Image (spheres, helix red, strand yellow):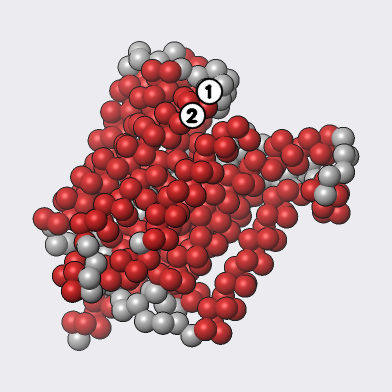
Amino acid sequence: MPEAAGPPGRPRVTLGLVTLVGIVVGLAAATLALGSVAIPLPDVVAILGGADLGSATTIVEQVRGPRLLTALLAGAALGVGGLIMQTLFRNPLADPFILGISAGASLGVALVVLLVGTSGTALVAGLSVSANLGVVGAAAVGAAAVTLLVLAASRRVASPATVLIIGLMVGYATTAIVSVLVHGGFGRFERVQAYIAWGFGSFAGTTWSELAVLAPAVVVGLGLAAFAVKPLNALLLGDAYAATMGVRVVRARRQLVIAASVLAGAVTAYCGPIAFIGIAAPHLARGLLRTSDHRVLAPATVLVGAAIALAAGLVAQLPGREATLPLNAVTSLVGAPVVVAVLLRLRRSSRAVAA
């Protein structure tokens, strides 16, 4: 990366997308059927068709249904956010979490929550719709601030590794500010406990009323990204090339920053700072379709991100047991090998160029 965004073979694209859709559907069915209480798949289908099966209906409609939709939205948002970051910075290891953008969103969330307050165990539980919008807006602003800061640094520094280090340092500094706010007497004990639990990441705490804010925010972010598909292809080969292709580079970058900030901010506000999905999904989509053409890579990344999120959420729930795992622990097990593979591929590429 960067690579030429040549057109992929149609049969490969069709087969790849159909396969991904099948995987997402299968994982969605498993998410509704499996958990601390297993519900037979025919019963799940009956419930979705309107049947009332007592407690099973309550579990599917009020617990697993919101969790399923949250995972789908979060996976798609983080995947596309990572794709935007990797193209915008022309860096295969860029994603909202590694570049500190999720930390910026966390700072926005912490500020709003400490000012507004919470009731309940979830970080945004009990907040009104306007307060929920405030949380998402603050998260998006925090994410945008960090994105612009790292983007400005990337224009002054040629080394992709240095840009990543700058992003990590900004993320650490932002996290330190959040720690001071949370533990420095600015919030009550229950808020601190809720914030710590939120930091582990989860798809399970979102309600239908909160999805009424999360879903439109993610749709807006994905829509902005969709309108920037052609500029993304041009930006793969640099700003100068994009300008010769008629792309208004400054406006395109602004649109992409807004899209990535909305996507990362909305997901972080409701699910916590989720690691590695943003970096893994684009690479897995590229490997499956063998292309960097964003016209097909973007929808494939949406599906791969959704599949990773569903699989991670399913594992984190530990079906058949009452306990749950921190979501970030599961996503790290998926994402860390992808990062290692990318680093090894970059090392082989650099050796080939040197030879």
Image quadrant of residue 91? bottom left
Q: Residue at x 22, y 62 (%)?
A: 248
Where's residue 270, x and y in %? 50, 36
- The answer to whether residue 197 shows anywhere in this view is yes
Where's residue 295, x and y in %? 43, 71
Between 36 and 244, the one lying in front of the other is 244
Where's residue 279, x and y in %? 40, 58
Q: CA distance from mark 2 to mark 1?
A: 6 Å
Q: Amino acid at mark 2?
A: Asn
In this rendering, would 269 be left or right of 248?
right
Q: Secondary structure at mark 1?
A: loop
Where's residue 181, x and y in %? 33, 21
For disc 1, the marked residue is: 128
**Dot 2 surroundings within 10 Å: few (below 14), some, or many (20 or more)?**
many
Q: Which mark is residue 297?
A: none
Between 82 and 296, the one lying in front of the other is 296
Image quadrant of residue 240? bottom left
Between 133 and 178, the one lying in front of the other is 133
Q: Secondary structure at mark 2?
A: helix
For disc 2, the marked residue is: 132
Looking at the rendered image, the quarter that the N terminus falls into is bottom left
Q: Residue at x 81, y 39 (%)?
A: 57
Question: Looking at the image, is 113 positioned above or below residue 4?
Answer: above
- The answer to whether residue 161 shows anywhere in this view is no
In this rendering, would 310 be left or right of 102?
right
Q: Residue at x 44, y 79 (%)?
A: 290
Q: Are marks 2 and 1 in contact (CB under 8 Å)?
A: yes
